[in-house]
Amino acid sequence: MNDRIVIDPKVCHGKPVIRGTRTPVALIVGSLAGGMGFDEVACEYGLTVADIRAALKFAGELVEKEQYHPLPA
């Protein structure tokens, strides 16, 4: 796992967040998907561009993990 992303059951119910913050990866990705730029997200949530890139990398790695979805018969 990236050293900027932490998962702690005592912080944000165990959701992945940026280390030293309570800013969830999902919030960062959602903000970017909603049209905010890197600099806007960084300013809004007190993050660095490196934090934002780490969140995107984490999200991308999560999507790449093998998943199984049952198909209807």
Image (tube, rainbow, N blue to C red):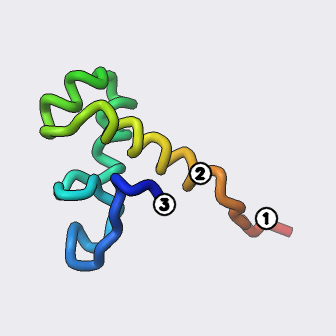
Residue 1 horizontal side relative to residue 35, left or right: right
Give the mark, 2 or 1, whose residue is nearer the N terminus: 2
Instruction: Give SS at disc 2.
Output: helix
Residue at the image position 31 percent from the left and 41 percent from the top: 51
3 and 1 marks in contact (CB < 8 Å)? no
Give the SS element for disc 3.
loop
Question: Which residue in the structure is indicated by mark 2?
Answer: 63
Residue pointed to by mark 3: 1
* Farthest residue, direction front: 3
Sequence-wise, the earlier of marks 3 and 1 is 3
- Does 65 appear above or below 41? below
Name the residue rendered at 48%, 60% in the picture. Answer: 1
| Label 3 to label 1: alpha-carbon separation | 31 Å
Callout 3 amino acid: Met
Q: Amino acid at mark 2?
A: Val
User: In this view of the protein, which residue sits in the foreground, 68 or 20?
Assistant: 20
> Percent x, y for residue 62?
55, 55
Element marked by disc 1: loop
Under mark 1, the amino acid is Leu
| Residue named by callout 1 | 71
Label 2 vs 3, first from the N-terminus: 3
In what quadrant of the picture does the C terminus appear? bottom right
Give coordinates of residue 66: x percent, y percent: 71, 61
2 versus 57 height, above or below:
below
What distance separates the C-alpha of mark 2 from that of mark 1? 19 Å
Q: Which quarter of the figure has residue 55?
A: top left
